Amino acid sequence: PQCQIFLDSPMATRATEVYNNYAHLLSKKCQEYKERDGSIFDFEWFVYTPDVEASKKINEFDRRTIIIAGSGMCTGGRILHHFKNRLWNRKNTVIFVGYQVEGTLGRRLVDGARWVKIFREDILVKAGIHTINGFSAHADQSAIVKWISQMDGLTRIFLIHGEKDKQIILRSVLENVFDQKVHIVEPEEVIYL
């Protein structure tokens, strides 16, 4: 069925501009879209939200809609306004396409929280919450080992992202494979190279 699609993410909007500016480097199909439509992403029901006010107006939209909003862990940004206005309604669905780190709003939702606090207001979660795996940019251990093994002259390895228990396991693997110390960087830690 026909529905409005909002791209409500300044970073994603800028990324689409990059793709449009370099469409000549993309597939023939993308080049055809660009030549025919002026953009590879524009189509009749697709709307970019240029600012916060336009973003907030989406919540006045009462028809079927898809909102594509950033802030991967849901810790800030425009997504919070959509959650505040939509999580309480069972007619809505939130689809996560990336990993949600422990301690974040996104993780609490994925883990099935019944209530969440947004802008100091308790919100009852009635919306469907789903995760589609496979879209995350996070690599698995073997991919990380392969990637690191292609680096010449590597003298130090720092782990700066991920859950602590997973970092400890990865550190052990990397130390065994590369025969060197691997440092897990703590939050706010400063490293002098």
Image: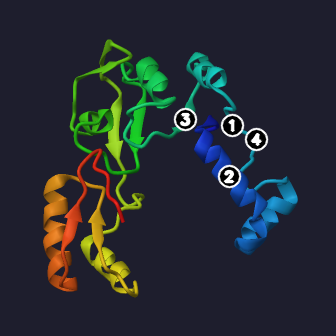
Q: Label 3 sits on what residue type? A: Ile
Q: Are marks 4 and 2 in contact (CB under 8 Å)?
A: no
> Which is more N-terminal, label 3 or label 4?
4
> Which is more N-terminal, label 2 or label 4?
2
* Rendering coords of residue 166 (x, y %): 17, 60
Give SS at disc 1.
strand
**Residue beneath the point at 21% across and 65% down:** 183
Question: Mark 3: few, some, or many residues within 10 Å (few <14, many ≥20)?
Answer: some
Mark number for residue 62?
Answer: none
The correct choice, above or below, for 173 with respect to 8 in the image is below
Give SS at disc 4.
loop
Q: Label 4 sits on what residue type? A: Glu
Q: Are marks 2 and 1 in contact (CB under 8 Å)?
A: yes
Left/right placement of residue 105 relative to residue 181 reads: right
Q: Are marks 4 and 3 in contact (CB under 8 Å)?
A: no
Read off the residue under disc 2.
16
Q: CA distance from mark 3 to mark 2?
A: 16 Å
Q: Nearer the viewer, residue 182 or 52?
A: 182
Q: CA distance from mark 4 to mark 3?
A: 15 Å
> Which is more N-terminal, label 2 or label 3?
2
> Which is more N-terminal, label 3 or label 1?
1
Q: CA distance from mark 4 to mark 1?
A: 12 Å
Give SS at disc 3.
strand
Left/right placement of residue 126 relative to residue 83 reads: left
Read off the residue under disc 4.
44
Residue 88 appears in which quarter of the rendering? top left
The correct choice, above or below, for 156 with respect to 44 in the image is below
* Rendering coords of residue 21 (x, y %): 77, 59
Q: CA distance from mark 1 to mark 3?
A: 10 Å
Read off the residue under disc 1.
48
Mark number for residue 67?
Answer: 3
